């Protein structure tokens, strides 16, 4: 029996990519497509909107109308807070790819992990999560003797900066080196900034065109540098990872995981 997966934010780019990824899965199926109540897509055929042909599944404007085993949410912080509370009240697992939470919002989301299995990740790409692991090694070997800079690029429509993935990369590096990212991060430079402190981790952000997502972490030492990077050419890489996480949360025979906060590295066994 296929796992029934609901997708919020279905009218967006990731919503359509998730529909495609679910269509390619033998173990999961799209059981509900949700948009904002005021959206013109309410009532439209989900398959046609996703470019997959007629499916017979109408898009709905209320999560309460959805039948699902696991919810995948790539929306916005306020919407994700409401959707997570909905899942917690009904004992449903949730996969969250939303970024841009402030600390209080993130804490509110994670509080629900006491009652349901919750997978929250800044990036669901297998390659990016492998990069996280590689960054731990690079930071241990090079971190104390190198300046560390993180550069990310995304499409013109992305609303938060730096990206959640870039921040996660910084957290991995800082944590490995025993630093607090909130104290050492430098988010852009301008004017007479003075000499660079070795302990800082710099971030640079590029926005434009249709870039799906590029991330590079540079370890710059005297005489050499090491770069660990990832370039996404399709949102399907994120969507397939999110579907993999949904299946992992649901577990065999819908037995499911224990309540708790998981991330994509848990899903991949990293």
Image (cartoon, rainbow, N blue to C red):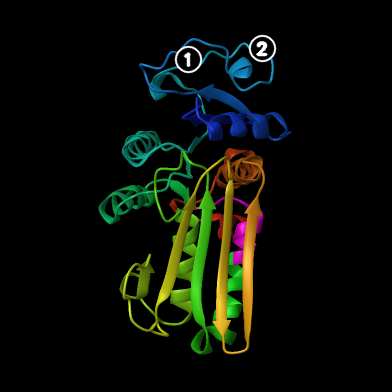
Q: How far is the residue under mark 1 from the one under mark 2?
A: 14 Å
Residue highlighted by disc 2: 54
Q: Give the vertical position of 38 relative to 233 (above or below).
A: above
Quadrant of the image for the C terminus?
Answer: bottom right
Query: Which residue extends farthest left?
Result: 104
Along the line of sight, which residue is nearer the eye, 51 or 93? 51
Residue 11 left/right relative to 78: right
Residue highlighted by disc 1: 41
Return the mark for residue 115.
none
Residue 116, given in percent of the width and then of the height, sits at 42, 45
Residue 267 left/right relative to 83: right
Along the line of sight, which residue is nearer the eye, 78 or 200? 200
Q: Is residue 121 visible?
A: no
Residue 36, given in percent of the width and then of the height, sits at 38, 22
Q: What residue span does the magenta drawing correspond to?
A: 121-131
Q: Residue at x 61, y 23 (%)?
A: 50
């Amino acid at each position: 029996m296929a796992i029934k997966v609901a997708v919020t934010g279905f009218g967006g780019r990731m919503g359509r990519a998730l529909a495609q990824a679910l269509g390619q899965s033998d173990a999961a199926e799209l059981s509900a497509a949700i948009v904002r109540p005021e959206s013109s897509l309410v009532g439209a055929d989900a398959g046609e909107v996703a470019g997959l042909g007629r499916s017979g599944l109408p898009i709905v404007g209320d999560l309460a109308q959805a039948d699902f085993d696991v919810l995948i949410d790539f929306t916005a912080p306020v919407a994700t807070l409401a959707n997570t509370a909905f899942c917690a009240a009904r004992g449903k697992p949730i996969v969250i790819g939303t970024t841009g939470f402030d600390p209080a919002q993130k804490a509110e989301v994670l509080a629900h992990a006491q009652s349901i299995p919750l997978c929250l990740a800044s990036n669901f790409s297998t390659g990016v999560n492998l990069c996280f692991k590689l960054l731990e090694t690079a930071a241990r070997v090079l971190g104390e003797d190198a300046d560390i800079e993180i550069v990310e690029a995304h499409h013109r429509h992305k609303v938060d900066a730096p990206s959640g993935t870039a921040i996660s990369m910084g957290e991995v590096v800082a944590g490995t080196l025993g630093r607090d990212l909130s104290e050492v991060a430098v988010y852009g430079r301008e004017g007479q900034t003075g000499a660079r402190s070795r302990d800082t981790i710099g971030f640079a952000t590029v926005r434009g065109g249709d870039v799906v997502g590029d991330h590079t972490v540079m370890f710059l030492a005297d005489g050499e540098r090491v770069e660990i990077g990832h370039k996404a050419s399709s949102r399907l890489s994120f969507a397939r990872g999110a579907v993999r996480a949904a299946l992992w949360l649901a577990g065999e025979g819908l037995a499911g995981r224990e309540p708790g906060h998981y991330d994509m590295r848990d899903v991949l066994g990293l």
